[in-house]
């Protein structure tokens, strides 16, 4: 049982630091605090830091001097009696305090995630908030932090709990109609009302699922692939964006044979940037495999940077738009539409084009609305010409792919698990419609399945709540 054992762990980061936090949770927390902080009378005021000498409970050796805090249950993170020791962050100090706690009867080291699991069992967090807490801890970019914080604050859980409540109400009305309609205690219009509620709810769930996986993409990182012909400057672009020599750059065509990946933070959005082999026909089996992998990665990409050597457009700039459209089609999979945010056209080596011709090229491209977003860049010039414009385009595309975590409206789906359960929920709502006129009991089972699917997301579902609604809404047995 959760209330049978007291657990402890280092809750701050490992390694040398100014302050380390050791957390204790469980029924023996007060005993641990008393024995190690020399408390002989009443416990300290809740949630108020006190400076105390921390000693070994058996030898009374002084281990450190630091702050202690007391969190009596249920007003704590885990819902149990909890205590914290804020000590100096040296490895020897931390080790001594942990060993001293482990020597106390009924106190043991916590398992991974056990504090959060106890908080869930105590009803302090639902599963969506638990997942949001985990995402917040692992967030590496600003957008990830915002999304995780919104989920941890309960926005997603409240949305699903609202749907669950509405489903429980629908189920309560259906079951009341089945059980009491023959006694004329329930009117026939009740089921018609339920039909409207179910239709509206199904529409909301389906709309929530049509998010193009923005939240999941933001959580795991946007797959951005650099693709194009050999010697277009793809590896140079990777190095420029990374601001380090991540890829080998050579004038020899076909230098890149395999996919090279690097993680970036672009405008607060997490990006997994991939450099790929140049796309061309080759008799070399190793290069052919590299080309195959490049095309496979483009098919999986959330966003493709189609890179072209802009000097190849010089002979006839008026034909540049048509040449570029053909080039894009040769790089992207056949089903992809280059007019969407999935593609950004990068015309590299612009430093090799005379200024007058560069202006003409820009005018020709500006007058071609059928092209995807495009940018003229130079990866070798000292000013990295056009890079700022490319970054602006990338940020706009990433925002379109991931959405704004702080925007108004319902929060985004963040977990594949949520999506699977919501799809099951929709299938169960469809079952209600299929059986509504044939067998109301089977239709009610569809509502139960939908409710169960939502309950698996938050970790909460109970039959007693349905009974409560039946008696409250219809006053049966009054």
Image (tube, rainbow, N blue to C red):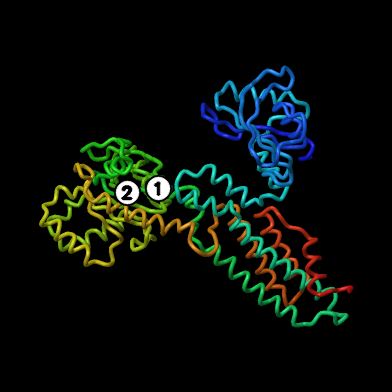
Q: Please name the residue shown 70% across and 65% down the image.
A: 165
Q: Is residue 130 left or right of residue 240?
A: right
Residue 47 occupies which quadrant of the picture? Answer: top right
- Crowd band around label 2 with a 10 angstrom C-alpha radius: few (<14), some (14–19), many (20+): many
Q: Please name the residue shown 24% across and 66% down the image.
A: 368
Secondary structure beneath label 2: strand
Q: Image height check: is 360 above or below 137?
A: below
Going from N to C along the chain, the mark reached first, 2 or 1, is 2
Quadrant of the drawing holding the N terminus: top right
Q: Which mark is residue 227?
A: 2
Q: Is residue 9 left or right of residue 243?
A: right
In the picture of the structure, the residue carrying the numbered disc 1 is 297
Task: Say which of 432 and 15 sits in front.
Answer: 15
Secondary structure beneath label 1: helix
Residue 187 occupies which quadrant of the picture? Answer: bottom right
On the image, the x and y values in percent for residue 242 come to 33, 41
Q: Please name the residue shown 65% across and 69% down the image.
A: 430
Q: Is residue 133 left or right of residue 189?
A: left
Q: CA distance from mark 2 to mark 1?
A: 9 Å
On the image, the x and y values in percent for residue 262 come to 39, 40
- Proximity of marks 2 and 1: CB atoms separated by less than 8 Å: yes
Task: Say which of 77 and 267 sits in front.
Answer: 77
Q: Is residue 315 left or right of residue 24?
A: left
Q: Please name the residue shown 62% across and 73% down the image.
A: 200
- Crowd band around label 1 with a 10 angstrom C-alpha radius: few (<14), some (14–19), many (20+): many
On the image, the x and y values in percent for residue 466 come to 78, 65
Residue 35 occupies which quadrant of the picture? Answer: top right
So how many labels did they put on this image?
A: 2
Q: Image height check: is 434 above or below 249?
A: below
Quadrant of the drawing holding the C terminus: bottom right
Q: Which mark is residue 382?
A: none
């Amino acid at each position: 049982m959760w209330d049978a054992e007291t657990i402890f762990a280092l809750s701050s980061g490992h390694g040398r630091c100014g302050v380390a936090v050791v957390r204790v949770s469980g029924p023996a927390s007060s005993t641990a605090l008393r024995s190690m902080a020399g408390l002989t009378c009443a416990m300290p005021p809740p949630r108020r830091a006190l400076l105390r000498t921390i000693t070994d409970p058996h030898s009374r050796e002084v281990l450190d001097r630091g702050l202690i805090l007391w969190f009596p249950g249920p007003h704590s993170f885990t819902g149990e009696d909890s205590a914290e020791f804020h000590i100096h962050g040296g490895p020897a100090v931390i080790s001594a305090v942990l060993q001293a706690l482990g020597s106390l009867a009924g106190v043991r080291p916590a398992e991974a995630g056990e504090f959060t699991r106890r908080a869930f069992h105590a009803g302090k967090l639902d599963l969506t908030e638990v997942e949001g807490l985990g995402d917040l801890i692992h967030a590496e970019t600003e957008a990830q932090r915002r999304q995780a914080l919104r989920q941890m604050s309960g926005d997603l859980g409240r949305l699903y709990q609202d749907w669950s409540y509405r489903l429980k109400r629908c189920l309560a009305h259906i079951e009341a109609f089945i059980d009491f309609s023959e006694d004329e205690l329930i009117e026939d219009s009740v089921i018609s009302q339920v039909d409207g509620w179910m239709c509206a709810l199904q529409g909301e769930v389906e709309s929530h699922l049509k998010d193009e996986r923005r939240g999941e993409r933001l959580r795991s990182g946007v797959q951005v692939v650099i693709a194009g012909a050999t010697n277009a400057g793809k590896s140079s672009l990777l190095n420029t964006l990374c601001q380090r020599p991540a890829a080998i750059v050579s004038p020899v065509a076909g230098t890149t044979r395999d996919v090279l990946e690097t993680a970036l933070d672009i405008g607060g959005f997490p990006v997994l940037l991939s450099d790929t082999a140049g796309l061309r026909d080759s008799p070399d089996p190793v290069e052919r495999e590299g080309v195959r992998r490049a095309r496979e990665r483009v098919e999986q990409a959330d966003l493709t940077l189609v890179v072209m050597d802009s000097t190849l457009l010089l002979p006839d700039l008026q034909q540049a738009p048509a040449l570029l459209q053909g080039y894009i089609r040769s790089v992207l999979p056949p089903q992809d539409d280059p007019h969407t945010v999935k593609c950004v056209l990068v015309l590299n080596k612009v430093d090799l084009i005379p200024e007058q011709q560069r202006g003409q090229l820009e005018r020709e491209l500006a007058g071609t609305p059928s092209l995807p977003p495009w940018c003229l860049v130079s990866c070798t010039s000292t000013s990295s010409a056009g890079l700022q414009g490319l970054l602006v385009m990338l940020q706009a595309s990433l925002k379109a792919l991931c959405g704004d975590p702080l925007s108004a409206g319902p929060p985004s789906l963040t977990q594949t698990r949520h999506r699977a359960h919501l799809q099951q929920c929709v299938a169960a709502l469809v079952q209600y419609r299929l059986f509504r006129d044939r067998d109301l009991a089977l239709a009610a089972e569809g509502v139960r399945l939908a409710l169960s699917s939502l309950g698996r997301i938050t970790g909460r579902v109970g039959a007693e709540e349905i009974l409560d609604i039946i008696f409250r809404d219809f006053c049966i047995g009054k």
